[in-house]
Amino acid sequence: MPDFKVHILGCGSATPTARHKPSCQVVDAHGKLFMIDCGEGAQLEFRRQSLKFSRLGHIFISHLHGDHFLGLPGLLSTMALHRKEGDVTVHIHPEGAELLQRIMAVLCRETSYTLHYDIIPPGFTGTIYSDRSLTVDTFPLYHRIPCSGFIFREKPARRTLRADMLEFHQVPVSVRRHIAEGADFTTPDGRIIPNAWLTRDPEPPASYAYCSDTMRRDAVARAVAGVRTIYHEATYDDAQAFKAAPRGHSTARDAAITARLAGAARLVIGHYSKSITDESLLAAQAAEEFAGTIIPAAEGLIFTP
């Protein structure tokens, strides 16, 4: 299985419907789970997809509209009932931290884990999480209230050793770590074997941008430039484009323009209006603006960025 994949738990907008749950995704990266937004029903879909609370340590909330936030108190309470241990960090705007603290004081005063709040100042751009294999950056989006997007990037991996060439050139085990780190090999008779002969290029690092509720802006395309796979809200089709900007949202065509300007290879669209009954129409309109791969989100979808 790949070390980096994304699970769609919800891809509707505003209210749950018979077809879609509100926004929620989980990034599964190198053994750790990172949740992005937490609309109603998120924990049910989390369980349905056989994800484990023990691996969930970070939750990123883009903004405080209910379809992105209302599932969080229930999720945190359930995690306490399941006696999850360790730390859980909620990355959230200041008002969201204050609100969640008040809710938790009523619903779940004691947790089996330690709950932390990482405050994201509205409009902030920068890195908000880093470990040995992954970074998460945030950037502002353009909605009716402060809203943040997130970029998940794998750190570059080391080159991989070629067992056949190591054996052919009789490279001792004691120096192979140095070879993996980029060193050449000098044989006992003084010949230099270039590192490129002994190793392979690693897989390109994955990168994934989550563009939640936002109007189309060139600034968003600049913020996610170079990211391989972009998720971008596509609330409306062309026929309802007149609703998009006044409500702080985008059409599928808007999402595609952003992906094209950003130089992405793939676009995942979601956050569908309840009036959308055929996501293939949105994908077709997006394809008129973006030549890369277009994937309509759906609950249960799992993909590798």
Image (cartoon, helix red, strand yellow):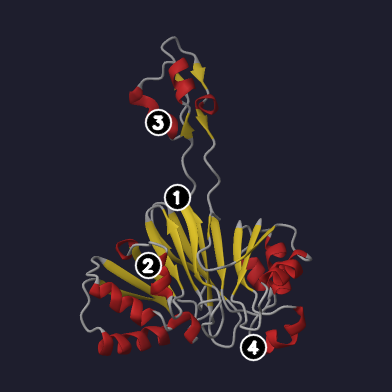
The residue under the point 66% across, 55% down is 265
Mark 4 or mark 2, which has the lower sequence index?
A: 2
Amino acid at pointer 4 = Arg
Give the number of callouts. 4
Describe residue 22's horizontal placement relative to residue 230 as left or right: left
Mark 3 or mark 1, which has the lower sequence index?
A: 1
Near-viewer residue (55 or 185): 55
Label 3, label 1: how many angstroms apart (C-alpha)?
A: 24 Å
Mark 2 or mark 3, which has the lower sequence index?
A: 2
Mark 4 or mark 1, which has the lower sequence index?
A: 1
Query: Which image quarter: residue 253?
Result: bottom right
Label 1, label 2: how many angstroms apart (C-alpha)?
A: 20 Å
Q: Indicate which label's residue lies in the foreground, 4 or 3.
A: 4
**Disc 3 target residue:** 178
**Disc 4 target residue:** 247
- Where is 103 relative to 166, above or below? below
In this view, the residue farthest toward the front is: 18
**Disc 2 target residue:** 47
Label 4, label 2: how many angstroms apart (C-alpha)?
A: 33 Å
Amino acid at pointer 1 = Asp
Q: Counting other residues with Cα less than 10 Å from the Cα at mark 3, is it few (<14), some (14-19), or many (20 or more)?
A: few
Task: Classify mark 2: helix, strand or loop.
Answer: helix
Task: Classify mark 3: helix, strand or loop.
Answer: helix
Q: Counting other residues with Cα less than 10 Å from the Cα at mark 4, is it few (<14), some (14-19), or many (20 or more)?
A: few
In which quadrant will I find the C terminus?
bottom right
Query: Which image quarter: residue 219?
Result: bottom right
